[in-house]
Amino acid sequence: MWARRATGGTVALARRALLRSAETTGAGVARLSKYVSERSSGFGDTVWTEFTPLALKHKAVNLSQGLPSIPVEDFIIDALRQQAQPGWQHQYSRASGFPRLVEVIADYYSPEYQRTLQPLTDVCITSGATQGLFLFFQTFVNPGDEVVIIEPFYDSYVPQVEMAGGVVKSVTLRPPKADLGRPATSADWVWDPAELEAAFSERTKAVVINTPHNPTGKMFSREELELVARLAQQHDALVLADGVYEMLTYGEEHLQIAALPGMWERTVTLGSAGKAFNLTGWKIGWAIGPQELVQPMQLTQQYIPFCVSTPLQHALASAWEQAIENGFFDRQRRRFLGKRERLMEILNDAGLQPCMPQASYFILADTSNVEFEAPSQAPFARDYDFCRWLTSEIGVAAIPPSCFYTEPNRHLGARFARFCYVKQDDEIEEAARRLPRLAQYQRAATH
């Protein structure tokens, strides 16, 4: 009984802390701003700083952040529990990865890359994939180097490139046209090949390709990846392949750009235990590539975290071996597929126009036929106003996708909201009970 009270108290304390931080963010900043470096002075609060406390404040069903609320499977918990014993697992690990874990990863991915990966030289363990991004940019990007990024994008890309002194050259995926005549899918988000070609120059150091893609759920086609590969080779650029959602695909083949002809030598691919195993709090990721690229990253790694949590690496290695044997990855895909189908149905029934994702665990829904009144506040964008209103008035939290764009292209996300479906069934069903209230706000059809 006490344990339950203590847990509840901890949750309540965390809730109060989040709400208090949302109210006091920025306090004292003006007084201390003279000490902030130029590379950090332009940073503001992220979208998560606003919407997670907002969901708590209004007791909304939180379908915003990609934070799985489904239970972690028992075999993973058991693998972690085994580390709570005396032993060397409580001390420093090898800086670039616990040997057993990098061996498991090398064995698992070798068939995908059509080569035998060398665990000690082709793999580097990172403190989550986000730190893997930082490691790549710090290792390879010099001041003035250009990095091509596809937008919308994971919101860490641009700040991390800029912290390394790089210059972002963005290429935009255009949203599906409203008059497709059929339900849209994430494959309908496409770039202009000419715009992509124009983004490359003699100053291009790297291109970031995120497939499966956040926030659209798009899986880039072979033709699209071959265009990126051709341009990277033509301009002697590196490729950073962000593949954190690769194990969350629904029936379509995930293509590794590093497996295309001539691309292994210039590609680093990132993965994430948070996405693959629903372990976002463990913060374990990995970088895979040729020794010529991974070894410099391993050397840089020594001076950032030095090493990643040793007991968690031990536990992940054990859990991964068991996951292969017990069919975890296929079981998880089937589970998430059911949740995707249910949330698609709920959003459709609520009068929104969801775009079917090929992968990941997010759905972008077109909200343009919803008329609502809400006080506008910074950032001033329709999708921000809609998501604030949806959270406070309807009781369902979503994320405004314009935060995943550069400033000139924020308008392209304005008619959408991003919903996450890796949630407990009762949360999804509670959203199903609340979202029908949107019917009274539907714009009348025009003929």
Image (spheres, grey):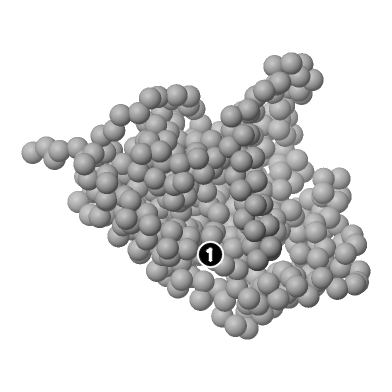
- Picture quarter with the N terminus: bottom right
Residue at image point 70% right, 50% down: 132
Q: Based on the displayed image, in which of its 4 quarters is residue 311 positioned? A: bottom right
Residue at image point 67% right, 73% down: 76
- Picture quarter with the C terminus: top left
Q: Is residue 83 left or right of residue 337?
A: right
Name the outermost residue toward the bottom.
Answer: 325
Q: Nearer the viewer, residue 21 or 236?
A: 21
Q: Is residue 391 left or right of residue 36?
A: left
Q: Position of residue 187 (x, y in %)?
A: 38, 54
Q: Is residue 246 visible?
A: yes
Q: Position of residue 279 (x, y in %)?
A: 64, 61
Residue at image point 37% right, 61% down: 429
Q: Relative to residue 206, is residue 292 depicted above or below?
A: below
Q: Position of residue 407 (x, y in %)?
A: 49, 27
Q: SS for tag 1?
A: loop
Q: Is residue 259 left or right of residue 150?
A: right
Q: Relative to residue 313, is residue 411 depicted above or below?
A: above
Residue at image point 58% right, 37% down: 19
Tell me the kind of residue under disc 1: Ile
Task: Please give the residue where the numbered disc 1 appears in the rendered image.
Answer: 70
Q: Nearer the viewer, residue 64 or 359?
A: 64
Q: Position of residue 358 (x, y in %)?
A: 41, 60
Density class for disc 1 (Cα within 10 Å; few <14, some 14-19, many ≥20) is: few
Q: Based on the displayed image, in which of its 4 quarters is residue 69 positioned? A: bottom right
